[in-house]
């Protein structure tokens, strides 16, 4: 059984360059580095990164790990469930919900303005720090990620604990 707190933290750490999966057997999140490694249709796995500064043995170990895990995901599709992407999580919507949850007034209007336009995430962060709302934001965001984790678990028939 997976903890919604820990799965919510995994959701928050998602990156575009990596494919994250929940392993039903180990009940842990695993990932395949799709930025540095290209696994094509013919299973001719290719290292795409610049390894000039990398230790060759370390690169080989990372490559083999990614290659093995990628193959395992292909051959055991019922075991692995892909986590949603950062796009599907939509942190901007979480920011918007946080702003909507604020009491009406000048601060709320300033926060609403901060989440629109170029640099919205940075501006939002600056405003919540300025208004001493950082801890409120962290609590709200953690709860939102837990809720997204709950919905994802229910959609994928994965048992969870609060």
Image: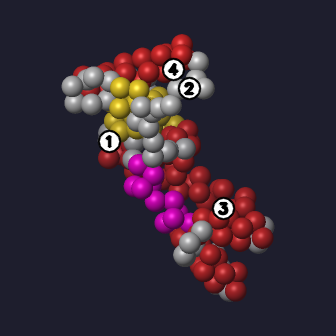
For residue 33, above or below residue 13: above
For residue 139, above or below residue 119: above
- Separation (CA) of disc 4 from disc 1: 34 Å
- Separation (CA) of disc 3 from disc 4: 38 Å
The x, y position of residue 156, in whole percent, is: 32, 41
The x, y position of residue 45, in whole percent, is: 32, 24
For residue 10, above or below residue 102: above
- Mark 3 packing: few (<14 Cα in 10 Å), some, or many (20+)? some
Q: Which residue is mark 4?
A: 59
Q: Which residues are magenta?
A: 85-95
Residue furthest to the top in view is 57
Q: Which residue is mark 2?
A: 52
- Mark 1 packing: few (<14 Cα in 10 Å), some, or many (20+)? few
For residue 75, above or below residue 145: above
For the point 35% across and 26% down, which residue is it?
A: 46
Q: Which residue is mark 3?
A: 137
Between 114 and 100, the one nearer to me in the picture? 114
> Which label sits in the foreground, 3 or 4?
4
* Labels 2 and 3: the sequence-earlier one: 2
Between 62 and 26, the one nearer to me in the picture? 62
- Separation (CA) of disc 4 from disc 2: 10 Å
The x, y position of residue 89, in whole percent, is: 44, 55
- Mark 2 packing: few (<14 Cα in 10 Å), some, or many (20+)? few
- Cβ–Cβ below 8 Å for labels 1 and 2? no
Q: Is residue 52 left or right of residue 153?
A: right
> Which label sits in the foreground, 4 or 1?
4
* Labels 3 and 4: the sequence-earlier one: 4
């Amino acid at each position: 059984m997976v903890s919604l707190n820990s799965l919510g933290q995994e959701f928050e750490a998602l990156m575009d360059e990596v494919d994250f999966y929940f392993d039903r057997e180990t009940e842990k999140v695993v990932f395949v580095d799709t930025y540095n490694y290209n696994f094509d249709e013919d299973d001719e796995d290719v290292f795409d990164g610049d390894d000039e500064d990398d230790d060759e043995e370390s690169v080989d170990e990372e490559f083999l790990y990614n290659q093995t895990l990628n193959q395992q995901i292909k051959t055991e599709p019922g075991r692995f469930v892909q986590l949603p992407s950062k796009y599907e999580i939509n942190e901007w919507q979480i920011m918007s919900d946080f702003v909507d949850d604020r009491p009406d007034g000048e601060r709320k209007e300033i926060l609403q303005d901060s989440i629109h336009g170029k640099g919205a995430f940075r501006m939002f962060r600056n405003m919540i720090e300025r208004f001493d709302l950082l801890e409120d934001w962290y609590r709200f965001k953690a709860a939102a990620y837990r809720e997204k984790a709950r919905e994802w678990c229910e959609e994928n028939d994965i048992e969870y604990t609060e």
